[in-house]
Amino acid sequence: MRLNNSGFCFLGALLLAGCAAQRPPLPDVPQVDLPRFMGDWYVIASIPTPFEGGAHNAVESYKLDADGTIATTFSYRDGSFDGKVKTMHPRGYVLDKESNAVWAMQFFWPIKSDFRIAYVSSDYKRTIIAREKRDYVWIMARAPSISAEEYARLKKLVTGFGYDVEQLERVPQRW
């Protein structure tokens, strides 16, 4: 059987799809204490979405509402420390009630995005939020800076989750 260019492209697409299917699922934190997870998280680094590129002083804040959903406020300065403040208010929905680690984040109805707490430190001072697609990731902390050693450790975890850390960008924080 001879393959033309279209055949090679189709075969290549099938092989890539097979490789993607072989990727292991992201690890989730076995148990997230939601009340303890709530509050402010400074974005230390991310593979940013198109909306947050160039963010400075980025902070993600969570508040557990009575209905079990999570009121979220993501704010940052656009492009510089003096840039315009931009704010988004997505709503979080806990999908895995056993672990509380798998959420859907809704920026606008009816679309909900994958949002996974892939890591949280035992003292709830550092976290990594990831997505199954491995397209976006956020390293966050309760303080606006972390040590170089801690950053390297968290970056290594992100690598282990299957992300291309060459795309990871530090988020400038100055308060």
Image (cartoon, rainbow, N blue to C red):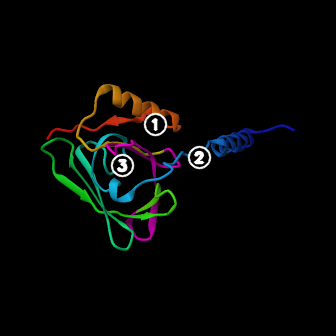
Residue at mark 1: 158
Q: Callout 2: helix, strand or loop? A: loop
Q: CA distance from mark 3 to mark 1?
A: 20 Å
Tell me, yes or no, whether the two marked residues, 3 and 1, touch with CB atoms within 8 Å.
no
Give the image location of residue 8, x and y in percent.
72, 38
Q: CA distance from mark 2 to mark 1?
A: 13 Å
Q: Which residues are drawn in magenta? A: 106-134
Q: Amino acid at mark 2?
A: Pro
As displayed, is residue 103 above or below residue 154?
A: below
Q: Residue at x 31, y 44 (%)?
A: 53
Residue at mark 3: 50
Q: Amino acid at mark 1?
A: Val
Residue at mark 2: 25
Give the image location of residue 1, x and y in percent.
87, 38
User: Which mark, residue 84?
Assistant: none
The image quadrant that residue 18 belongs to is top right
- Of helix, strand and loop, which mostly describes the magenta segment? strand
Q: Amino acid at mark 3?
A: Pro
Q: Is residue 150 left or right of residue 101?
A: left
